[in-house]
Image: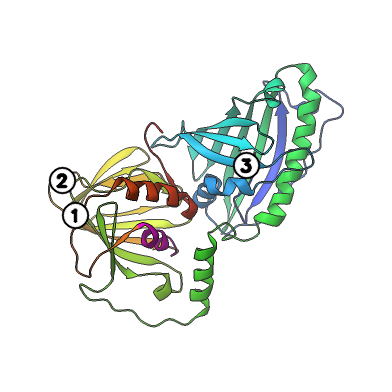
């Protein structure tokens, strides 16, 4: 019941009540469907990634008696995203669960809302929110619709009112919160991007062992280029991943991530599927793609990792442990380091898919 993807066209086509019959066929007082729109240059997968960046959900404000979203967090995360459950808390103290039942980042997204607390528990059995995406030249057209299922005929008028308020809240949210593609980025990242995009930059040459070097949960990263050197367009770094190293499955809501294996062997998990990558293998992960990697071998692996646009490197600097230039190994991560990463990542648009969590 929130809208955070920016710069794209949204049309509320229909709001349906009951198992199959639209409310327009049940009542002469049915609401008209009035579109709320914006335009987007972003690909569907990027829009989907932004929608599922839970850090954005609290930006949704209600309308009239329709309350705001106070918090949203994953109760269950699955590697393939489908089946993941999100607990949403509302400012009036009520809550509900949203389960992802369809995940096709280039085509569609569908969430089923249920387990309502009062007062919705007395009115509805579930809501279903659906998104479909269609490319129109270089832009994206997205269609969003809700199906609201009442518990009884008596509940239909109340849900009709909710549908009106919901549609108006979405329109207002578009106008005030979804105007620019970077409106939800952490202030520090946005400020850095504004500064680097405005300032001329010079050629960058880093020879071994030059480059800021840090350890992040046991892996070693040497940064060859950051947003400050590339006008915010991309970041590039070398990763040394020891046996057993690598992050859990996760997805990005803001940047694409590319990997090129230089030495050793890395096992990628992409949309729940395992892919063994040897030296010379390149992999690109579009925004919103669940992925992770691990060194399952018995010797270190080395690869280049790119981020486009830049900005996420600031998360590494925030949670990482500084190392001397030329460092090749790092101490095993402490519990505090892991907890810090898990706490900081959502603020950078990263959703970590922890099994069983």
Name the dominant secondary structure of the magenta segment: helix
Q: Which residue is mark 3?
A: 70
Front-lying residue, 93 or 278: 93
Q: Nearer the viewer, residue 107 or 258?
A: 258
Neighbor class of circle 1 (other Cα within 10 Å; few <14, some 14-19, many 20+) is many
Q: Residue at x 57, y 49 (%)?
A: 56
Q: Residue at x 42, y 52 (%)?
A: 286
What residue sits right under mark 1 in the picture? 301
Quarter of the C terminus within the rendering: top left
The residue sitting at the left extreme is: 298
**Residue stretch in magenta:** 310-319
The image quadrant that residue 16 belongs to is top right
Q: Is residue 38 visible?
A: no
Q: Is residue 227 left or right of residue 42?
A: left
Tell me the SS state at disc 3: strand
Residue 261 in the image: x percent, y percent?
A: 23, 57
Query: Compared to 207, does 322 lie above or below?
Result: above
Task: Indicate whether 357 appears above or below 259.
Answer: above
> Contact, CB < 8 Å: mark 2 with mark 1?
yes
Residue at mark 2: 297
In-image side of 49 versus 30 (left or right): left
Task: Determine whether the residue tagged by mark 1 lies in a helix, strand or loop.
Answer: strand
Binning the other alpha carbons within 10 Å of mark 2 as few (below 14), some (14 to 19) or many (20 upward) gives some
């Amino acid at each position: 019941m929130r809208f955070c993807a920016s710069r794209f066209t949204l049309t509320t086509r229909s709001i349906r009540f009951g198992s199959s019959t639209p409310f327009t066929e049940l009542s002469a007082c049915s609401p008209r469907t009035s579109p709320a729109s914006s335009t987007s240059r972003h690909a569907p997968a990027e829009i989907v990634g932004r929608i599922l960046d839970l850090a954005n959900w609290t930006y949704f404000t209600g309308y009239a008696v329709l309350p705001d979203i106070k918090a949203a967090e994953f109760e269950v995360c699955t590697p393939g995203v489908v089946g993941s459950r999100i607990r949403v808390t509302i400012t009036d103290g009520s809550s509900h669960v949203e389960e992802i039942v369809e995940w096709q980042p280039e085509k569609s997204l569908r969430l089923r809302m249920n387990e309502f607390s009062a007062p919705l528990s007395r009115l509805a059995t579930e809501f279903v929110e659906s998104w479909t995406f269609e490319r129109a030249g270089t832009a994206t057209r997205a269609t969003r619709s809700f199906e609201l299922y009442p518990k009884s005929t008596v509940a239909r008028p109340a849900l009709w009112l909710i549908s009106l308020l919901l549609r108006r809240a979405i329109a207002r949210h578009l106008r005030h919160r979804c105007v620019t593609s970077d409106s939800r980025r952490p202030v520090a990242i946005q400020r850095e991007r504004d500064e680097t995009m405005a300032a001329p930059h010079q050629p960058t040459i880093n020879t071994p062992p030059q480059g800021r070097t840090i350890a992040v949960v046991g892996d070693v990263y040497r940064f060859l280029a950051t947003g400050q050197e590339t006008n915010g367009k991309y970041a590039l770094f070398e990763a040394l991943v020891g046996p057993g190293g690598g992050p859990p499955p996760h997805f990005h809501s803001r940047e694409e991530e590319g990997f090129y294996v230089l030495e050793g062997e890395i096992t990628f998990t992409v949309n729940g599927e395992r892919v063994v990558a040897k030296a010379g293998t390149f992999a690109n992960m579009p925004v919103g793609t669940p992925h992770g990697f691990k060194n399952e071998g018995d010797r270190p692996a080395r690869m280049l990792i790119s981020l486009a646009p830049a900005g996420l490197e600031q998360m590494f600097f925030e949670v990482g442990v500084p190392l001397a230039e030329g460092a090749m190994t790092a101490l095993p991560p402490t519990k505090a380091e892991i907890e810090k990463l898990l706490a900081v990542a959502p603020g950078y648009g990263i959703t970590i898919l922890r099994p069983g969590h």
